[in-house]
Image (tube, rainbow, N blue to C red):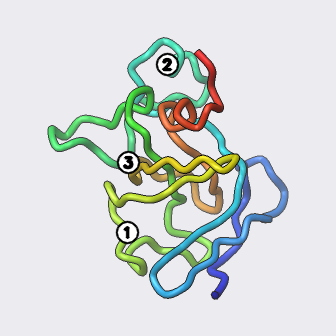
Amino acid sequence: MQGVGTFKTDESRASSEIQLCRKDKAIWFKADLDIDCDGGSTAACKADDAYLPETSCVASNGKPLDASSLPFFVLPLNSNGFKLSDYGITCGTVGAVIFNGKVEYAILGDRGPKGVIGEASYALAKRLSLIHI
């Protein structure tokens, strides 16, 4: 197992504390889970202060992914020694997200800020029981 780099949980954090690890082409990390509403179509997502109408990845019709209905995770833009292409990761790559012993599969659907890690779509947060509606 080899460390790739350390990342912040939020842009406002003073230091990087999340270690991104790898073995061969597999990567993993343990982080908080901030909710990404980018591309979301619901009122709850559009009310988010950090809402953006676009996602880095798009659907086959060229439209942004909908964070309110599609379970996806977010990885940072290339930074801190981490580059998606080094691992064969592209938009739509499937990954497992584990929370409180519950596993949900999701796709890479958005790219976050450089040096920051630990976001998932609103829909994925609901599946992990982080949002109760």
Q: Earlier in the sequence, mark 1 or mark 2?
A: 2
Percent coordinates x, y for residue 91 in the rendering: 33, 57
Residue sitting farthest toward the left: 61
> At label 2, which amino acid type do we have?
Lys
Of marks 1 and 3, the one in the foreground: 1
Percent coordinates x, y for residue 105 in the rendering: 44, 50
* Residue at horizontal 66 percent and vertical 50 percent from the top: 101
Of marks 1 and 2, the one in the foreground: 1
Residue on which the image places disc 1? 89
Contact? badges 1 and 3 (CB < 8 Å): no
* Residue at horizontal 39 percent and vertical 20 percent from the top: 41
- Residue closer to the observer: 46 or 73: 73
Left/right of residue 26 with respect to residue 53 in the rendered view:
right
Q: Which element carries disc 1, helix, strand or loop?
A: loop
Q: Earlier in the sequence, mark 2 or mark 3?
A: 2
Residue on which the image places disc 3? 56
Q: Residues within 10 Å of mark 3 (few under 14, many from 20)?
A: some
Percent coordinates x, y for residue 97 in the rendering: 55, 53
Q: Residues within 10 Å of mark 1 (few under 14, many from 20)?
A: some
Please identify the quadrant where the N terminus is shown. Answer: bottom right
> At label 3, which amino acid type do we have?
Ser
* Residue at horizontal 28 percent and vertical 44 percent from the top: 58
Mark 2 to mark 3 CA distance (whole Å): 17 Å
Q: Earlier in the sequence, mark 1 or mark 3?
A: 3
- Residue closer to the observer: 84 or 128: 128
Residue on which the image places disc 2? 46
> At label 1, which amino acid type do we have?
Ile
